[in-house]
Image (cartoon, grey):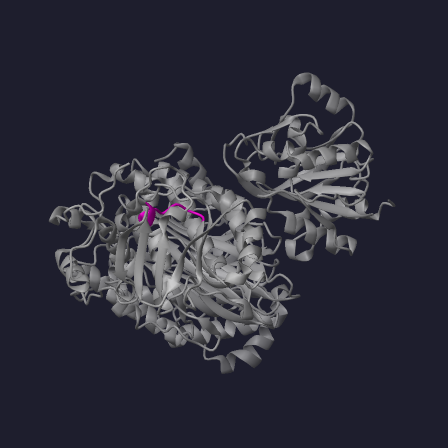
């Protein structure tokens, strides 16, 4: 096997590595000579958008990342938040968009694998996952294949690994035809005094490789994920990694056992850009150099070049710095789990990243410039143009009951049961709210009453129309969904999916969305503790809708008092909390207009953050006091869809009054923000209106009652629950069978 | 009664099973790693669910051929009760400690949902906490739960009262022949079932229908 580390670096070779000419000039200046071939690969791996955040860093810094409960904010493998009693929740969301489009099963599976590793790398046992998925139009030729592959891949990995999927999102829109989004969230539990970090300490300490062997899969994956797609996309298939959940499960158990021995000084999983980024990260953070001897790296096949080894994204691998005196103990743990264990290098005091292969030094680079001092851009951005508000005289009409049924049977709002039944939602025995409600909830094992709530949210329609309001809304809806269970929202992670940041209008979307997210997070005391940015989600020059997914975590002191969306009983009062004095009529950018009339006009509903907080805090108190018997947040599809969901989940109908004189369409389908449906027993109403309401400063009209087997919205035709359910449950399975397009 | 939970690499419902046995029996079961030299003396051996060895050859196939299974086979022959749930059931059929096989679900997809089970034979150590014909709720979570046996085996299993549970009220989630969800060995001391009674034992699970299986076993005198 011949490998020439000293090939002539041509402009074409530089471009093939996704590096811009000025970036290459920067490399020349930094090292004072032409890089070797391996070095060029290392730079491309570290300086690409995916690993360096070079376009977004300036703006990410503006997000609130601290708080009373925050133990670790962004910059580590995952965020860490205190949940009391010496325990912490460790969580993050990360995208695997590009690979999942190219190879849906493996792309999605390894996305789940990667995020789980991020969590257990920090010493936490994963307890919940969610997945926010966005696909192209249902009628697009690839959509069915992609849905089927992505869902099977997520299930195949998570189910085998053994973690419950408790929530997520599935959406369809033609703007994702060429770039689907797979955003995977994972959360784990750890003791606050046993959190592990990636910062190496001590000179001359062994750098140890653990887990699966290194193969040629995924070489150049991170660079691929930092470029747009063209027509040659199929050629990129070899850059997608292959997942092995069985190895990941063993790696989890082995890592947790190893951590318990006290042998681990620093740990970093090998994710994007594998061995390169994990070693650079550990060294750069610890102000240490790293020397790697590639002859010691366990490989899956013979004849791998140093270039391939440094850029491989083979899955289920970890790098650690260990206490040398505990090496034998550590090796025994990995022998038990039949995983590879090899000392592949050591820490040094010279701040260089040196790579040896067959006696040759194939790379020798300044470690800080590769890592935490990578390039950063202040890319030009333009102020997004704002749509005109919807003309109140231009509201298309439809029979209300028909509109509701058609919306429930639409790709946007139909039941996702076909998807979430392929995920194990019960494993570990702690799930107390499964997917399908406002948020997934799991008990905290070992604690009598405590639970954690999880929700993932964003409304790309709103973000496209107004990135700033859309960013705010994504945070507010996540906060609201957690609140609707009775949880205190404690912190969030963000997964920012956008198009090509080199275009000022896309950069403008990113900048404004981050501003909106930051403002909402500050107002709601909901810090961002981890996250991921996925740019270049474009095909042939057309970008996706701006999609800043927010994954939030809430803390429930006593799960026996949490609220669910299903109506609790017949004959209860239904109140609309947080309504403006006309109940809400905002139809701009609504699902009603988009799904039933193909219209994407108007401004998105604005979010009043002070109001949001006031309403949410009141609803939470009513849940904990046992006054609220069922709670559901209002979002896509407004009041009508919210009521239908509560009715279908319980099998109990409802009758809703109607405001005099108004057009019922905006009243029932408007998507005004900051609203909840809350039910109460009739005899609790008087106390509420007499003793709480006068001081609450929140409008909460009594709009109807539960009962019966139909849903009656004002003067509209009563719709039997069986008819609602048939519409709601029918679309997804029929679509996947190919019976509808 | 003393219980042991067996752990092969890749099993992942061991923690659920240990929690259920501990909460119901008031005592933690022994946990036996597949390579442990000693197998404790117990009255009940439980093989929990998961994906032993990744289910990479066929579900349960590799674990069924591991040395530990020979010990379990010998104990079963001595009359020790053996319970296999989900992957544990698959392992027991692969080891031929139970009749029939478990094929890929008819939908070809993993399925996690709640189903109804009819208790077919309540006259065993495992099922005596239920009454014959009783309908209970129970969750399933599997990719390969489609029970099948050739006509002769099926006739024997049915005729001999070896069907423990059947999916009821049209809830068969996987295409199992005769809606079979769980079967006994001919001696009734080995039970395998696809559903997860260990995930329906307390209020937090939304029901306790799975509890009677474990409480009946754990209350037996050794």
Magenta segment: A309-316
Q: Is residue B30 magenta?
A: no
Q: Residue furthest front?
A: A359
B76, A527: nearer the viewer: B76
In this picture, residue A6 sits left or right of residue A483: left
**Residue A209, image x, y percentages:** 44, 52
A625, A321: nearer the viewer: A321
Whether residue B55 appears in this view of the structure is yes
In this picture, residue B24 sits left or right of residue A561: right
The residue lying at 69 percent from left, 21 percent from top is: B154
**Residue A427, image x, y percentages:** 59, 49
Magenta-highlighted stretch: main secondary structure?
Answer: loop
A83, A458: nearer the viewer: A83
| Image vertical order of residue A232 relative to residue A111, above or below | above
Which image quadrant is residue B86 in? Answer: top right
**Residue A316, image x, y percentages:** 45, 48
């Amino acid at each position: 096997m011949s490998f020439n580390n000293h090939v002539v670096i041509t402009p074409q070779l530089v471009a093939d590595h996704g590096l811009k000419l000025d970036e290459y000039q920067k490399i020349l200046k930094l090292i004072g000579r032409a890089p070797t071939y391996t070095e060029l690969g290392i730079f491309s791996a570290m300086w690409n958008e995916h690993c360096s955040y070079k376009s977004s860093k300036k703006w990410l810094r503006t997000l609130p990342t601290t708080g009373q409960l925050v133990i670790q904010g962004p910059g580590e493998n995952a965020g860490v938040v205190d949940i009391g009693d010496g325990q912490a929740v460790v969580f993050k969301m990360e995208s695997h968009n590009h690979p999942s489009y190219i190879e849906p099963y493996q792309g999605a599976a390894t996305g789940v694998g990667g995020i789980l590793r991020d969590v257990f790398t920090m010493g936490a046992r994963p307890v919940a996952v969610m997945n926010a998925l966005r696909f192209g139009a249902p009628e697009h030729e690839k959509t069915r294949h992609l849905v089927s592959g992505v869902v099977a891949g997520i299930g195949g990995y998570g189910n085998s690994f053994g973690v419950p999927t408790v929530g997520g999102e599935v959406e369809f829109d033609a703007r994702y035809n060429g770039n689907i989004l797979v955003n995977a969230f994972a959360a784990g539990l750890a003791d606050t005094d046993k959190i592990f970090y990636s910062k190496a300490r001590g000179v001359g300490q062994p750098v140890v490789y653990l887990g699966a062997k290194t193969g040629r899969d995924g070489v150049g994956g991170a660079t691929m994920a930092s470029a747009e797609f063209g027509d040659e996309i199929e050629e990129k298939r070899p850059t997608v990694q292959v997942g092995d959940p069985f190895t990941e499960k063993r790696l989890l158990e082995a890592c947790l056992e190893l951590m318990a021995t006290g042998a681990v000084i620093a740990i970093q999983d090998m994710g994007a850009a594998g061995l390169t980024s994990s070693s650079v990260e550990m060294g750069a953070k610890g102000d240490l150099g790293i020397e790697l001897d590639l002859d010691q790296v366990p490989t899956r096949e013979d004849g791998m070049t140093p270039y391939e080894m440094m850029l491989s994204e083979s899955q289920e691998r970890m790098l650690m710095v260990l206490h040398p005196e505990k090496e034998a103990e550590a090796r025994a743990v990995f022998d038990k789990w039949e995983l590879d264990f090899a000392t592949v290098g050591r820490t040094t005091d010279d701040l260089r990243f040196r790579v040896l292969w067959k006696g040759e030094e194939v790379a020798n680079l300044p470690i800080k410039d590769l890592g935490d001092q990578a390039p950063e851009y202040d890319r030009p951005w333009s102020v997004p143009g704002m749509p005109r508000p919807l003309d109140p005289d231009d509201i298309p009409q439809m029979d209300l009951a028909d509109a509701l049924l058609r919306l429930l049977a639409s790709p946007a709002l139909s039941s996702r049961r076909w998807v979430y039944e392929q995920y194990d939602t019960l494993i570990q025995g702690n799930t107390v709210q499964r997917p399908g409600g406002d948020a997934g909830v799991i008990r905290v094992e070992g604690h009598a009453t405590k639970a954690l709530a999880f929700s993932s949210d964003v409304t790309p329609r709103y973000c496209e129309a107004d990135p700033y309001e859309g960013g705010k809304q994504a945070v507010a809806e996540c906060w609201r969904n957690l609140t609707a269970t009775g949880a205190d929202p404690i912190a969030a992670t963000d997964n920012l999916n956008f198009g090509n940041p080199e275009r000022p209008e896309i950069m403008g979307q990113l900048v404004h969305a981050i501003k909106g997210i930051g403002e909402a997070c500050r107002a709601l005391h909901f810090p961002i503790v981890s996250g991921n940015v996925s740019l270049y989600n474009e095909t042939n020059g057309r970008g996706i809708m701006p999609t800043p997914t927010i994954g939030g975590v809430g803390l429930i002191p006593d799960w026996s008092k949490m609220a669910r969306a299903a109506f609790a009983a017949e004959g209860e009062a239904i109140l609309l909390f947080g309504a403006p004095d006309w109940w809400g009529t905002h139809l701009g950018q609504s699902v009603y207009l988009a799904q039933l009339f193909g219209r994407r006009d108007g401004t998105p509903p604005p979010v009043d953050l002070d109001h949001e907080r006031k309403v949410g805090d009141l609803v939470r108190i009513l849940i904990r006091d046992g006054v609220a018997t069922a709670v559901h947040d209002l979002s896509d599809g407004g009041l009508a869809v919210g009521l239908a969901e509560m009715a279908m989940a319980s099998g109990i109908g409802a009758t809703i009054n109607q405001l005099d004189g108004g057009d019922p369409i905006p009243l029932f389908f408007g998507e005004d923000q900051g609203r909840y449906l809350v039910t109460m027993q009739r005899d609790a109403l008087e106390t509420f209106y007499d003793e709480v309401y006068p001081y609450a400063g929140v409008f909460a009209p009594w709009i109807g009652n539960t009962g019966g087997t139909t849903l009656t919205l004002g003067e509209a035709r009563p719709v039997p629950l069986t008819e609602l359910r048939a519409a709601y449950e029918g679309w997804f399975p029929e679509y996947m069978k190919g019976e509808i397009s | 009664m003393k219980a042991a939970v067996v752990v092969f690499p890749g099993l992942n419902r061991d923690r659920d099973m240990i929690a259920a046995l501990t909460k119901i029996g008031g005592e933690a079961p022994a946990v036996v790693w597949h390579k442990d030299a000693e197998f404790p003396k117990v009255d009940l051996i439980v093989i929990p669910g998961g994906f032993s060895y990744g289910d990479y050859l066929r579900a349960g196939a590799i674990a069924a051929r591991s040395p530990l299974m020979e010990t379990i086979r010998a104990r079963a022959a001595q009359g020790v009760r053996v319970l296999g749930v989900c992957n544990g059931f698959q392992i027991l059929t692969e080891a031929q400690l139970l009749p029939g096989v478990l094929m890929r679900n008819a939908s070809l997809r993993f399925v996690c949902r709640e189903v109804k089970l009819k208790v077919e034979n309540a006259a065993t150590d495992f099922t005596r906490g239920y009454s014959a014909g009783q309908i209970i709720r129970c969750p399933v979570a599997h990719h390969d739960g489609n029970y099948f046996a050739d006509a002769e085996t099926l006739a024997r299993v049915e005729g001999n009262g070896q069907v423990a549970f059947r999916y009821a009220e049209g809830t068969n989630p996987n295409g199992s022949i005769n809606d079979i969800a769980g079967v006994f060995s001919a001696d009734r001391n080995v039970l395998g079932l696809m559903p997860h009674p260990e995930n329906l034992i307390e209020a937090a699970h939304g029901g306790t229908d799975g509890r009677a299986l474990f409480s009946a076993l754990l209350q037996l005198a050794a």
